[in-house]
């Protein structure tokens, strides 16, 4: 895929999304970017030197059941939590 004439991969898309919206969840990654394995992309990005904050969020699913999921955000120049 190319954006503004530059070849981009899934890692680039995840970073751009977090910078644009502040954070990302697995559902957002799949729905908005077509990234099916967000945790793997986060692992790749950590190896590239990015640092992330993981926040466990809670919500109800479409059946009314409580669910938990992880929301990732970038820590600019900080320590990983």
Image: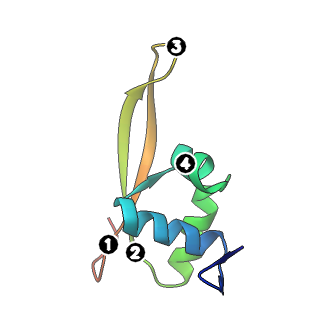
* Type of colouring: rainbow
**Up/down of 73 relative to 9, above or below:** above
Q: Secondary structure at mark 3?
A: loop
Residue at mark 1 to residue at mark 2: CA–CA distance: 5 Å
Q: Are marks 3 and 1 in contact (CB under 8 Å)?
A: no
Sort mark 4 into few (<14), some (14-19) or many (20+) by Cα contacts within 10 Å: some
Q: Secondary structure at mark 1?
A: loop
Which residue is the extreme one toward the right? 1
Task: Give whichever of 30, 66 is nearer the camera.
Answer: 30
Q: Which residue is mark 3?
A: 63
Q: Which mark is residue 51?
A: 2
Q: Which residue is mark 4?
A: 26
Work out whether mark 1 precedes mark 4 in sequence or the reverse, and give the earlier one: 4
**Up/down of 46 relative to 53, above or below:** below
Q: Are marks 2 and 3 in contact (CB under 8 Å)?
A: no
Using the rendered view, name the quadrant where residue 19 is placed. Answer: bottom left
Residue drawn at (45%, 13%) of the image:
64
Which residue is the extreme one toward the front? 4
Screen quadrant of the N terminus: bottom right
Q: Taking the image as drawn, is residue 53 in sight?
A: no
Q: Which mark is residue 75?
A: 1
Work out whether mark 4 precedes mark 3 in sequence or the reverse, and give the earlier one: 4
Q: Secondary structure at mark 4?
A: helix
Q: Secondary structure at mark 2?
A: loop
Count of numbered badges drawn on the protein: 4
């Amino acid at each position: 895929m190319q954006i503004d004439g530059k070849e981009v991969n899934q890692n680039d898309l995840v970073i751009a999304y977090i910078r644009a919206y502040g954070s990302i969840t697995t559902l957002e990654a799949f729905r908005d970017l077509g990234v099916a394995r967000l945790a793997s992309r986060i692992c790749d990005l950590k190896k590239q030197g990015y640092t992330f904050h993981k926040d466990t969020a809670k919500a109800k699913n479409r059946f009314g059941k409580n669910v938990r999921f992880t929301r990732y955000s970038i820590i600019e120049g900080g320590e990983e939590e």
